[in-house]
Amino acid sequence: MEQGERLIVWFDGGCPLCRREIALYRRLDQGRRIEFVDLANKDAACPIDRAEMLARFHAMEKGRLLSGAAAFAAMWRAIPILLPFGMIAQLPLVDRLLEWGYRHFLRFRPRLQRWFE
């Protein structure tokens, strides 16, 4: 990521699990390279349909909209301590495995949300 260029990350602020995870990433983002957009705020700008944005994790990296594991990898690349994980996540096999895991996680997300309320 180039100097001064910020990654945009959209998250579901209505999800207690998501809020906790984003709080961690905010603490790690000491260089403030990420702009976090809470989709629970009805005034938040969405590049695509809000329901679609809420269904999967999204990020905008260098003008490219990413979702799922690719969006997480972009966020990791923006945080220096997580950069190695973000770089490894770009490898084709790793990317596919992470996306597979992310899709399976989405099936359990509603149950996990209840644990964090």
Image (cartoon, rainbow, N blue to C red):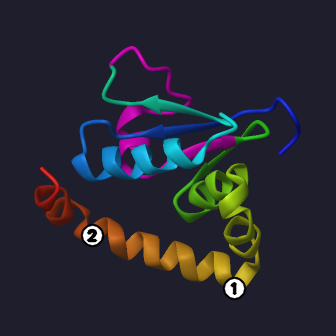
Q: Where is residue 26 in the image (x, y as percent from the top left)?
A: 51, 41
Q: Nearer the viewer, residue 106 or 80?
A: 80
Which residue corresponds to mark 1? 93
Q: Where is residue 30 in the image (x, y as percent from the top left)?
A: 63, 40
Query: Range of the magenta residues?
Result: 42-60
In magenta stretch: residue 55: yes
SS of the residue under disc 2: helix
Amino acid type indicated by mark 1? Leu
- How far is mark 2 from mark 1, CA to CA? 22 Å
Mark sitting earlier along the chain (2/1): 1
Which residue appears farthest toward the top when viewing the image?
A: 43
Q: On the picture, is 31 further left or further right than 116?
A: right
Q: Is residue 82 above or below residue 24?
A: below
Q: Is residue 114 left or right of residue 77?
A: left
Question: Is 34 placed left or right of 68 in the picture?
Answer: right
Question: Magenta segment: does it hold 45?
Answer: yes
Q: Mark 2: which amino acid?
A: Arg
Location of mark 2 (residue) = 107
Q: Alpha-carbon neighbours of circle 2 within 10 Å: few (<14), some, or many (≥20)?
A: few
